[in-house]
Image (tube, rainbow, N blue to C red):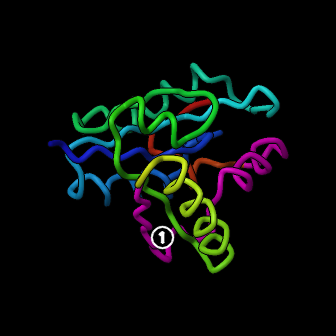
Amino acid sequence: MKKIAVFPGSFDPITIGHVELIKRAIPLFDKIIVGIGVNSQKKYLFPLEQRLKWINEAFSDHPSVEVQSFEKLTAHFCTKVGAKYLVRGLRNASDFDYEKTISQLNNIVGEGLETVFLISEPAYSHISSTIVREIIRGGGDATPFLPEGMKF
């Protein structure tokens, strides 16, 4: 039985912090599905097609990484794709408090879905998509926080 994990998020945009976490998770699983959650109530800076393209480009050399989009509950998406694991990154104690609660709920809704937490490397712990979006909206240079070659 293959070990399949989902790394969920909006990835609006994907950052070097996300890429680093996914690359660290590759040896742990047979397949990682980067799941782009789509929430019709949320306003995104970048369209879904662009986010899918960026992630596919970032992992073009990693055949065990797939990219898919989904709507509704992450736990239900995991069931649909046969994933028994979620991968989540933790930058700080606030992330842990939030993610712990979500992981417990996902474990119930996802009927045993396990969450694997990876602690961010210190060099990436200050990076978030929210901050990167603000830099972009403000006309700043966000390239130090984005995967190499990413253009918007």
- Farthest top residue in view: 49
Quadrant where the image shows the N terminus: top left
* Above or below, comparing residue 123 to residue 143 in the picture: below
The answer to whether residue 20 is seen in the rendering is: no
* Above or below, comparing residue 145 to residue 40 in the picture: below
Quadrant where the image shows the C terminus: top right
Q: Amino acid at mark 1?
A: Ser
Q: Is residue 126 magenta?
A: yes
* Above or below, comparing residue 14 to residue 85 in the picture: above
- Which quarter of the figure has residue 82? top left
Q: Secondary structure at mark 1?
A: loop
Q: Position of residue 105 (x, y in %)?
A: 59, 57
Question: How many marks on residues?
Answer: 1
Please name whichever residue, 7 or 77, is drawn nearer the observer in this view of the structure. 77
Q: Position of residue 53 (x, y in %)?
A: 48, 24
Q: Residue visible at 65% across and 58% down?
A: 128
Question: Which residue is tagged 1?
Answer: 120
The answer to whether residue 123 is seen in the rendering is: yes
| Classed neighbour count for the residue bearing mark 1: other residues with Cα under 10 Å, few (<14), some (14–19), many (≥20) | some
Q: Position of residue 143 (x, y in %)?
A: 59, 47
Q: Position of residue 111 (x, y in %)?
A: 44, 49
Q: Is residue 83 magenta?
A: no
Q: Is residue 10 left or right of residue 122?
A: right
Q: Residue visible at 72% across and 31% down?
A: 39
- Which quarter of the figure has residue 74? top right
Q: Residue visible at 76% across and 50% down?
A: 135
* Above or below, comparing residue 144 to residue 38 in the picture: below
Please name whichever residue, 2 or 124, is drawn nearer the observer in this view of the structure. 2
Q: Give the extent of the magenta segment.
A: 113-140
Q: Is residue 9 left or right of residue 53?
A: right
Please name whichever residue, 20 or 8, is drawn nearer the observer in this view of the structure. 8
Q: Residue visible at 38% across and 38% down?
A: 33
